[in-house]
């Protein structure tokens, strides 16, 4: 049995926090492409050198690079029981790639958790966390990129009947309870 959950929502919506909590309780890994990319940047790999300026600008790293990185991560044995995807997919081609990668192992996306947070709150949160790529200008750009390239995924997953929209502008525990219930309610992939 394998459980594959996508956390979807704008930057600052709490995907990382909620994915980490669910990972603890289900015992399956949180896979954050942002964290994987930052690890490449800090160890100065070829991918890291290419990704760094793109990440600093608030734009998206090219699909092929991120998807290849994800393919490798999914080969690690801890992902056999499934994964919580945090920050991937971010484009329609990435969503198709994720379906393809999972189907190689007889799996599929079981549910997509959409964390809904008002834009003013996102800006406040992103500026407060003070990450290197969270300056006022990149925050604006990251939100713009989200609207243009990532938000169309909501419709895709809605049509597939996989989208569960959760109000992300509440106490963290309340959100976690709802996330947990939403994930518990869906049947898991057979393999
Ligand atoms: P995050 O930590 O998820 O906010 O990601 C930080 C940055 O890494 C993003 O602004 C992008 O530049 C890059 N990134 C992370 N995940 C992806 C992805 N799935 N596709 C393209 N770029 C990504």
Image (cartoon, helix red, strand yellow):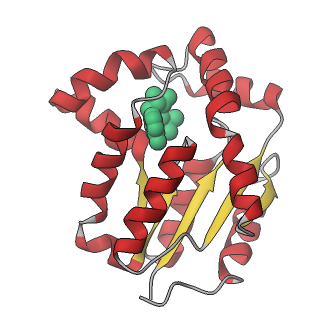
- Residue 90 is left or right of residue 75, and the answer is right
Name the residue rendered at 80%, 29% in the picture.
119
Q: What is the quadrant of residue 149 in the picture?
A: top right
Q: Is residue 74 above or below residue 169?
A: below
Number of marks in picture: 0
Most foreground residue, 25 or 146? 146
Q: Is residue 135 visible?
A: yes
How far from the left and from the top, in percent, is residue 73? 28, 57
Name the residue rendered at 83%, 35% in the picture.
118
How far from the left and from the top, in percent, is residue 161? 75, 69
Most foreground residue, 138 or 126? 138
Which quadrant would the C terminus be assigned to in this image?
Answer: bottom left
Name the residue rendered at 48%, 47% in the picture.
94
Q: Is residue 18 visible?
A: no
How far from the left and from the top, in percent, is residue 7? 60, 55
How far from the left and from the top, in percent, is residue 134? 54, 20
Which quadrant would the N terminus be assigned to in this image?
Answer: bottom left
Most foreground residue, 69 or 171? 69
Direction top: furthest residue: 137
Q: Is residue 27 above or below residue 100?
A: below
């Amino acid at each position: 049995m394998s459980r594959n959950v996508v956390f979807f929502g704008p930057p600052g919506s709490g995907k990382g926090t909620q994915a980490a909590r669910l990972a603890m309780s289900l015992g399956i890994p949180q896979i954050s492409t942002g964290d994987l990319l930052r690890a490449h940047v800090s160890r100065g790999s070829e991918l890291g050198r290419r990704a760094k300026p793109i990440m600093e600008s608030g734009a998206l790293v090219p699909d092929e690079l991120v998807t290849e990185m994800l393919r490798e991560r999914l080969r690690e044995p801890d992902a056999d029981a499934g994964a919580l995807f945090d920050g991937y997919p971010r484009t329609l081609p990435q969503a198709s790639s994720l379906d393809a990668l999972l189907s190689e192992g007889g799996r599929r996306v079981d549910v997509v958790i959409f964390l809904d947070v008002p834009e003013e709150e996102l800006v406040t949160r992103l500026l407060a966390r003070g990450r290197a790529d969270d300056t006022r200008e990149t925050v604006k750009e990251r939100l713009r990129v989200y609207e243009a390239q990532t938000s169309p995924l909501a419709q895709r997953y809605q049509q597939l009947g996989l989208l569960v929209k959760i109000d992300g502008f509440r106490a963290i525990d309340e959100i976690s309870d709802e996330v947990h219930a939403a994930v518990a309610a869906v049947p898991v992939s057979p393999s």
